[in-house]
Image (cartoon, helix red, strand yellow):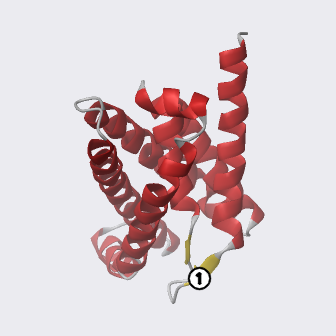
Amino acid sequence: MTNQNIKKLVVAALLTAMTCIATMIIKFPTPTFGYIHLGDGFVLLCGVVLGPVGGALAAGIGSMFSDIFSGYASWAPATLIIKALTGGIAGLLFHRLSHASKSNKSRYAAIIIGGVIGEAIMVFGYFAYEAALAALSSGVFDRTSLSAGIASSATGIPFNIAQGVVGVMISVLLLPVLAKIPDIREWIEN
């Protein structure tokens, strides 16, 4: 294993831990028994710094552990998949869009566009999971239970959108700070 691979592995572990901690520590409860947190900013940065595959793994695992440690273990499998997709898609779009032009403006546009699309995946993912979970918990999975599940799940959409907006803002604010680290700047630019 080369020094560069070891550095990337260490940064991946740090971003995984920071995603978990940012999700757990500062959170604002919502009326739907969820919470708005700062972790989505790190979910997006995982994809930007580590690329789509490494970023997806770090984002998904860090977010999943925050669910497990915070008493939301029933959400952990969905969170692993949803946040991995969020970070991976955001990272893929960031790298594709920011390479079109090497300017700082294109980097900000790339993280905003990648972040918005990644967070839209998060909003839809949690909506679909909660709707299915609510329908299944009724004991009968039919049109009526699915309709009720969709109706109850829809109440969480505005809060998930707010969480996504906060995540995009945090990633935009922290990207220039991370870009000052030579190795990370190289990974972001390549």
Residue 30 versus residue 24 in the image, above or below: below
Disc 1 marks which residue? 28
Q: What element carries label 1?
A: strand
Q: Which residue lies furthest to the right in this view?
A: 69
Position in image of residue 175 (x %, y %): 48, 49
Position in image of residue 98 (x %, y %): 30, 36
Give the camera-side residue of 150 and 125: 125
Q: How many marks?
A: 1
Give the camera-side residue of 185 and 135: 185
Position in image of residue 25 (x %, y %): 71, 71
Left or right, residue 123 beside residue 188: left
Position in image of residue 97 (x %, y %): 26, 36
Quarter of the C terminus within the rendering: top left
Residue 8 versus residue 105 in the image, above or below: above
Residue 130 versus residue 82 in the image, above or below: below
Q: Which residue is drawn at 62% across and 54% down?
A: 63
